[in-house]
Amino acid sequence: MDFELPVDDDPRRLAVRAWVSAHPDPTPVELADAGYSAPHWPRPWGLDADAEHQLIINEELDRAGIGPVDNQIGIGWAGPTLLFAGTEEQKQRYLRPMLTCDEFWCQLFSEPEAGSDLSSLTTRAVLDGDEWIVNGQKVWSTWAEKSEFGILLARTDPTAPKHKGISYFICPMDQPGIDIRPIREMSGGHHFNEVFFDGARIPAANLVGAPGDGWRLARVTLGNERVSLSHGGVCWGMGPTSHDFFDAVASTGGIDDPHLRQRAAAMYTEAFLLQLHDRKILSQTLAGTEPGPEASLKKLMADEHGQKLTDLAADLCGAQGMLAGEGRSGPFGGGEHEQWPWAQLFARALTVGGGTTQVQRNILAERVLGLPRDEAR
């Protein structure tokens, strides 16, 4: 593909700039009305944008300091799955409030004994008239505490082979029978949770696809998840970006130590390669190809890049890199730069959440290199 984007006076760029001029601080509703929340989605929710147009919009909004809409799991993971397999009624009901952030979403996949081996999940859903009754436990459910809905995998046929007995649901989160408990992180905050289901009820109309089709749809969701994780930042879209790192280095006059300078050069190369890989994935996605091994490669590269970049930021602080808060100064220190100490601690989660590094390497070994399937899976 052509990695050179259109020139500065391209009419599509000028159109975005004109809109930004009229909406310098847009609300999620204004972004959704313009089709900028998810430009590649079909109309009326997006603009049917091709890869080049999508990248132009992203670039111009980023240049104006307008970040992505804060509903990553909804827009990045749940939405594409509903577009792929949802009923027309489900699309009409859920996609617009998702784009405007009127309804926030979480993911309810992993369990204490079913993380990397997700198909071993044991949460049950039993049909009772026009409702499914759910019992079980989920873990590492990001932002469950503030979500209106969750995308839920539950076993609906315990007699079927483990990949065949799973179904995919839209789960209302504000109801009796759902208990959400925070998991405190070493970074000081929390956005992971445990979620317990004790007789929670889901309308039959909230089943996505057919009963037993959950594993196929989960692969669609996970492919989109792996593409979107770390997009826009080195910590799954949160906190600082690679551009922030190099801007901070430039603000200090560069790096004198040759070893640290070489590490920074490697990080610059990695960031550029990730950008090119993003464009390749986007082109494939907009051509109608669901994310496959390319998504695993993106996640593998991006997560290790995030860990190495935040470690390098700490090393550039010298002895102060062991501190957090106001005790750590400079462009990677405390105060307005507090995101860097937080990012280094949170980055430990990157190679675990959303599919471990080992799982991604297995996928690449089997589906790209053609190596024998891991017997443990």
Image: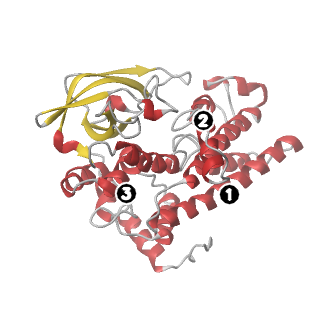
Residue at left offset 33%, top offset 27%: 123
Give the residue type at disc 3.
Answer: Ser
- Identify which residue is drawn at 45% across, 71% down: 50
Nearer-N-terminus badge (3/1): 3
Amino acid type assigned to the residue bearing label 1 in the image: Leu
Secondary-structure class at tag 2: loop
Q: Which residue lies furthest to the right in this view?
A: 258
The quadrant of the image that shows the N terminus is: bottom right
Quarter-wise, where is residue 187 in the image? top right
Q: How far apart are marks 3 and 2 (CA)?
A: 42 Å
Per the image, the residue denoted by label 1 is 273
Q: In the rendering, which numbered label is found on residue 37?
A: 3
The numbered mark, 1 or 2, whose residue comes first in the sequence reads 1
- Residue 205 higher or lower than 279, as above or below: above
Question: Quick one: label 1, few (<14), some, or many (20+) residues within 10 Å?
Answer: some
CA separation in Å, label 1 and label 2: 33 Å
Q: Is residue 366 visible?
A: yes
In the rendered image, which quarter contains the C terminus?
top right
Looking at the rendered structure, the kind of residue marked 2 is Glu
Expressed as whole percent of the image width and height from the top left, the position of residue 48 reads 37, 69
The residue lying toward the viewer, choosing from 344 and 106, is 106
207 to the left or right of 246? left
Q: Which mark is residue 375?
A: 2
Q: How far apart are marks 3 and 1 (CA)?
A: 25 Å
Query: Considering only order in the chain, which callout, 2 or 3, is on the residue closer to the N terminus?
Result: 3
Is 133 located above or below residue 98 in the figure? above
Question: Where is residue 336, by image quadrant?
Answer: top right
The structure residue drawn at horizontal position 53% and vertical position 34%, both measured from the top left corner, is 353
